Amino acid sequence: MNRRVLLRGTTALAFAPWLLRHARAADVPRFALGIASGQPHAQGMVLWTRLTGPDLPERTPVQWEIARDEAFTDIAARGEETAEADWAHSVHAEPAGLAPARWYWYRFRALGQQSSIGRTRTTPAPDAEAGALNFVIASCQRYDVGHYAAWRHAAAESLDLVMFLGDYIYEYATSPKAVRPLEGGHVRTLAQYRARYATHKSDPALQAAHAAAPWLLVWDDHEVGNDYASLQGQDLEPDFRARRAAAYRAYWEHMPFPKALRPVDANMRITGRLDWGRLARIHLIDDRQYRDPQVCPKPGKGGSNTVPLKDCPALLDPKRTLLGAEQEQWLAQGWDLSRPWNLLAQQTLMARCSWTDPGAPGSGAGTYWTDG
């Protein structure tokens, strides 16, 4: 390069600072948290990603496309979403009009970069005869106490679905003996929840599992706080509604849920149902948002306890509920005895389980954990 060409290029950059901005943007990983798909149905699914890196515009266009082949020579659908700072620059694309019971490949583009490629699929049509459903269930993936070897195995399997049944993150501060230390302390604010999800989603094995198959997800307690019940936290904090609102917002931002399920204040619906042809019906339920608080807590605390039944007769109150009346009715009405399988995707111990001899019915014996 001669001096004249060099000077001409330098002058052009001096009068076009946007070139420098975009050059810098292209050097920063913009898809560092991976990609995901979820909520599949016979004509489509949700495709997810979240833009990363500094200096992101308030509103950033993100292109997506989904193809019938891994080489993207046969495009089935494409579109554009706007990643907004208010929602952590998350993207929830919803392709429609796809063929039932087939595999697809998808990817995103933004700020001069392209994401990795993910594989996803549609479900069989509701009335189709489906021979098999291959899935894994997972839960309680506490990042700081171990590595995600199980996700490496899951990503290598031939799976139709991953069902994640709660505790995608843990809100606890890191122990001094942690295998993988976490940022910050005990999580309570929106910024802290977002950071905790970002740390979990940085794991390569978890990213690979998300990219290998569509996911169905429900939460448990640690996406908000240990043993929370409805609008009551374990520590009886007076601002728990605000904390739950922050937690639900961060959860939606980081999961492949449709835009229609975006939380409003401290409320978000995760209850849902999916039919896998005539073979199975999957019911996704919520044991936290609508439940009654646990009875007989420790003095000055909310949350769970382990108590003798004779000291806590409220455990036998038939009006108490994990699901709330509306969700109980929804579940009962949707249970489908015409299909060989009904699968209940849920979070919490749902049978009475005594730590000691429960004795004869009505004896008042037994020792029970009050969260289940």
Image (cartoon, grey):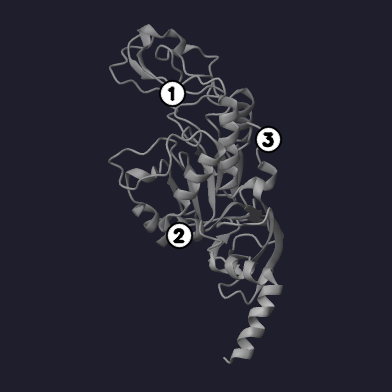
Give how far across and how far down residue 44 sits, in percent. 66, 57
Q: Tell me which corner region of the image, top left, top right, bottom left or bottom right, holds residue 190.
A: top right
Whether 140 is drawn above or below 323: the answer is below
Camera-side residue of 265 and 322: 265
Tell me if mark 2 has few (under 14), some (14-19) or many (20+) residues whose alpha carbon lies within 10 angstroms of its own.
many
Left or right of 287, for residue 176: left
Camera-side residue of 260 and 133: 260
The amino acid beneath tag 2 is Ala
Give how far across and how far down residue 158 sits, in percent. 45, 61
Left or right of 13, for residue 167: left
Identify the element where label 1 is drawn: loop
Judging by the rendered image, the residue that carries numbered circle 2 is 208
Identify the element where label 2 is drawn: helix
Judging by the rendered image, the residue that carries numbered circle 3 is 264
Q: CA distance from mark 2 to mark 3?
A: 31 Å
Identify the element where label 3 is drawn: loop
Tags 2 and 1 touching, CB below 8 Å = no
Judging by the rendered image, the residue that carries numbered circle 1 is 371
Image quadrant where one finds the N terminus: bottom right
The amino acid beneath tag 3 is Val
Give how far across and how far down residue 357 sits, in percent. 28, 16
Residue at the image position 50 percent from the left and 45 percent from the top: 195
Give how far across and how far down residue 124 sits, in percent. 61, 56
Q: CA distance from mark 2 to mark 1?
A: 33 Å
Q: Tell me which corner region of the image, top left, top right, bottom left or bottom right, holds residue 360.
A: top left
